Amino acid sequence: MPAIGRAQAWPAKPVHLVVAFAPGGPADIVARLLGQRLGETLAQPIVVENRGGAGGNVGAALVAKAAPDGYTALLTTASFAVNMTLFAEPGYDAERDFEPVSVVAFQPNLIVVNASSPAKTLAELFSEAKGKKLPYASPGTGTSAHLTAEYLFKVLAKVDMFPVHFRGAGPAVAAVVAGDPPVASLGVAGPLAQIKAGRLRALAVSSKKRVAPLPDVPTLAEAGFPGAEFDLWIAVFMPARTPAPVVNRLSGAIDEALHAPVVQERLQALAFEPGGGSAAEASAYVKTEIAKWRRVVQETGAKPD
């Protein structure tokens, strides 16, 4: 009974939301949007902390070791599932060390180039890449953007492009705007403002259909690669053994936030599809994603840097 009593009183102080990537990328954008709304719902501040590095492993490992008292949570991306196979020692076990809370949002990845690039289409980019090694920026080793690019470039297009990993989408976007490297694979939200400003050019999106903020950008299927669909998802986790009432309270608060019209409009403007649902649904989804990305890592032969 004492544990349940403490859970019912939760939260009695600020909750720290550790974002496993640098500021400016999809995870950070969603964390700050969600954090503001959750703070109102839970009547306690949500303190967003960016702990980027190793494709999300630094932040995940930090939260895995945190006290399971409900005051430390992790917001990360599909890299959480990818890294279980990609890294021999990611620093955590995705299924043993965490309680899934909610899959918050989904978003496709984009292949983008610096606006000065001669490539106007994916076919032109691949033609440029034939016969030479061409670097591309990723928001981190093990991110869905990294694996999307590896699968597209190496398995489907069979071009010799290699990743340059950054500590999140924000630094990767800045690098591609500067032209070094001139190509990137990123979730839509990170480079969207720079695409709108004309500093970057989007060549293709990894979704089943075109995204509303970029209606002129073809899907990978339209660009000649049918069936190539990969989502970047964003989810919230708590350390294993966090009391179930706390996990369910946070899951319910996130679901409530995601149903608010202002949150939905903001997410959709950034090409996010709102998620939500129960903690049990989040747990089942993450298990399927771990299995899916295991296959992609094995097929691409991707290695961490």
Image (cartoon, grey):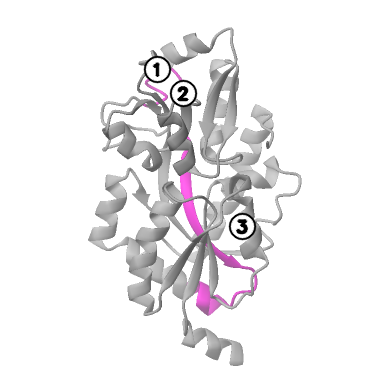
Comes first in the chain, label 3 or label 1 = 3
Residue at the location (36% across, 19% down)?
116
**Picture quadrant where residue 125 is located:** top left
Q: Residues within 10 Å of mark 2 (few under 14, many from 20)?
A: many
Q: What stretch is highlighted in magenta?
A: 219-248
Residue 236 or 245: which is nearer the viewer?
236
Q: Are marks 3 and 1 in contact (CB under 8 Å)?
A: no
Q: Are marks 2 and 3 in contact (CB under 8 Å)?
A: no
The quarter in which the C terminus is drawn is top right
Coordinates of residue 237 in the picture (x, y in percent): 55, 63
Residue 145 point in image, percent of width and height: 51, 36
Q: Are marks 1 and 2 in contact (CB under 8 Å)?
A: yes
**Helix, strand or loop status at disc 3:** helix
Q: What residue type is labelled 2?
A: Pro
Q: What element carries label 1?
A: loop
Residue 89 - label: none
In the rendered structure, which amino acid carries the disc numbered 1? Ser
- Measure how far apart labels 1 and 2 are at the Cα level: 7 Å
**Of tags 3 and 1, which is closer to the observer?**
1
240, 280: nearer the viewer:
240
Q: Is residue 30 left or right of residue 246?
A: left
Instruction: Name the residue located 49 percent from the left edge and 13 percent from the top edge.
Output: 126
Where is 36 relative to 132, above or below?
below
Comparing 241 with 192, the one in front is 192
Q: Residues within 10 Å of mark 1 (few under 14, many from 20)?
A: some
- Give me the disc on residue 117: 1
**Magenta stretch holds residue 282:** no
In this view, 125 is above or below 196: above
**Residue at x-position 33% and y-position 67%:** 37
- Name the residue carrying label 3: 60
Can you identify the residue that label 2 sits on? Answer: 182
**241 displayed left or right of 15:** right
